[in-house]
Image (spheres, rainbow, N blue to C red):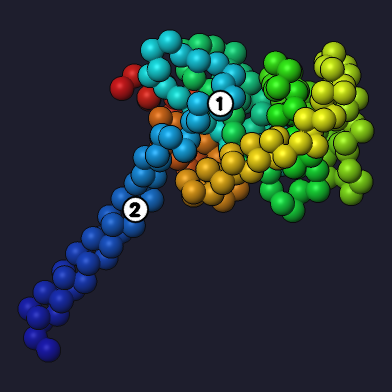
């Protein structure tokens, strides 16, 4: 093999390596495809805040017994306090079947929502998650205690927790999540695009600021 041929082959090989590197890098930075808006936010979806201009909508699929959701919760609350009604913040249920109290927790929050107490129960479950989470025994009585603390009509609360309507509502949220490609919690969507970074305060803030500025 001549020296010129060796040099040529070396240049071609180097170019191929560089090209592959570019492709891989670009694939890693490619945003997730925009999700179907009707599955992301339903008419009855729970909104913790609503932006008048509708410019930025953040949707979180969560599990109240999920340790990663609990870890993200302080940052989410900080963001909500910071942005207020500059953004629309939507919460969707996505209980993980392997978590023993995930469905009961979601049912308790939905039952509270039917008495206008979605956000107080949402906060209560996250604020106390280390006390009731990942217990083998059902935590229904614990959730009933929280409902009493919130001043709910307990007869109605208990009936709603065990109703087919509440169960179907939680399952419908989870079904939307599955259709959108949600595989774990928490999963965030910002303006219809799945957020793929670590759900820290700083990372979410950067994504929100980018959407607000666009």
Picture coordinates of residue 10, whole percent (x, y): 18, 73
Q: Is residue 211 left or right of residue 49?
A: left
Q: Quadrant of the C terminus?
A: top left
Q: Residue at x 56, y 46 (%)?
A: 175
Q: Residue at x 37, y 24 (%)?
A: 211
Can the viewer see residue 201? no
Q: Is residue 193 left or right of residue 46?
A: left
Image mark for residue 160: none
Q: Residue at x 38, y 12 (%)?
A: 53
Can the viewer see residue 89? yes
Count of numbered badges drawn on the protein? 2
Label 1: which residue? Answer: 44
Label 2: which residue? Answer: 27
Sort mark 2 into few (<14), some (14-19) or many (20+) by Cα contacts within 10 Å.
few
Contact (Cβ within 8 Å) of mark 1 with mark 2: no
Whole-angstrom CA distance, mark 1 to mark 2, is 36 Å
Secondary element at image label 1? loop
Q: Residue at x 47, y 38 (%)?
A: 39
Picture coordinates of residue 103, whole percent (x, y): 75, 42
């Amino acid at each position: 093999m001549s020296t010129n041929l060796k040099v040529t082959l070396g240049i071609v090989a180097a170019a191929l390596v560089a090209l592959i590197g570019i492709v891989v890098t670009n694939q890693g930075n490619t945003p997730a495809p925009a999700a179907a808006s009707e599955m992301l936010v339903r008419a009855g979806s729970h909104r913790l805040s609503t932006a008048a201009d509708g410019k930025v909508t953040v949707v979180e699929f969560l599990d109240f017994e999920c340790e990663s959701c609990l870890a993200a919760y302080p940052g989410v609350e900080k963001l909500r306090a910071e942005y207020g009604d500059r953004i629309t913040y939507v919460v969707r249920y996505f209980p993980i079947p392997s978590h023993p109290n995930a469905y009961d927790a979601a049912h308790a929050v939905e039952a509270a929502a039917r008495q206008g107490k979605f956000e107080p129960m949402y906060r209560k479950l996250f604020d106390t998650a280390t006390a009731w989470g990942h217990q083998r025994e059902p935590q229904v009585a614990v959730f009933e205690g929280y409902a009493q603390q919130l001043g709910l009509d307990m007869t109605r609360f208990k009936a709603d927790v065990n109703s087919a309507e509440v169960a179907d509502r939680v399952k419908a949220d989870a079904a939307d999540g599955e259709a959108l490609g949600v595989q774990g919690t928490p999963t965030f969507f910002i303006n219809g695009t799945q957020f793929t970074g670590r759900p820290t305060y700083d990372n979410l803030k950067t994504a929100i600021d980018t959407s607000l500025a666009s």
